[in-house]
Amino acid sequence: MNSLRSKGYYQWLDIFAYKKHYSSGFKFELFTKIANDEKESMIPNTPQGYAKLYTKCWSSDLIQRPTLDKISFELDILSREAPVKFIQNNNIDQQQMTS
């Protein structure tokens, strides 16, 4: 199992505020799914650039997965191209972050 891929999955959950129960049972189920190369369903309204990036990160072909530098670079570009929006319960809040 690829621990970086697991970490990326948890970050993806946090980025998109996709809440699940983080019980030990959920973690075991998650690791089993990752080991079996199962993927999460695309969250409706996920911005296309982010969806494309995390799909690349989840590739079972190691060569297709971007490096951390490439991920950082692409996230930097994505954050400049579109305003930050909050996604909660599969709905995009149109208010921009103002911090």
Image (cartoon, grey):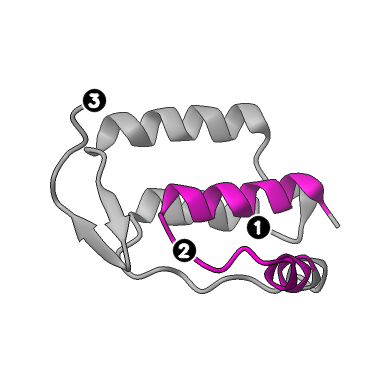
The amino acid at mark 3 is Ser
Q: Earlier in the sequence, mark 3 or mark 1?
A: 1
As helix, strand or loop, the secondary structure at mark 1 comes to loop
List the residue tagged with mark 1. Answer: 58
- Magenta part of the protein: which range? 2-31
Compute the Cα span from label 1 to label 2.
20 Å
Most frequent secondary structure within the magenta stretch: helix
The answer to which of 29 and 67 lies nearer the viewer is 29
- Asked if residue 30 lies in the magenta stretch, the reply is yes
- Residue visible at 80% across and 72% down in the picture: 32
- Assign the N terminus to one quadrant of the image: bottom right
Compute the Cα span from label 3 to label 1.
31 Å
Q: Residue 99, which numbered label?
A: 3
The amino acid at mark 2 is Lys
Give the total number of marks visible in the rendering.
3
The answer to which of 18 and 62 lies nearer the viewer is 18
Q: Position of residue 24 (x, y in %)?
A: 74, 66
Q: Which of pointers 1 and 2 indicates the residue nearer the eye? A: 2
Q: Position of residue 58 (x, y in %)?
A: 65, 57
Q: Is residue 69 above or below residue 58?
A: above
Mark 3 in CB contact with mark 1 (< 8 angstroms): no
The answer to which of 19 and 41 lies nearer the viewer is 19
Compute the Cα span from label 2 to label 3.
23 Å
Q: Is residue 4 above or below residue 91?
A: above
Judged left or right of residue 68, residue 29 is: right
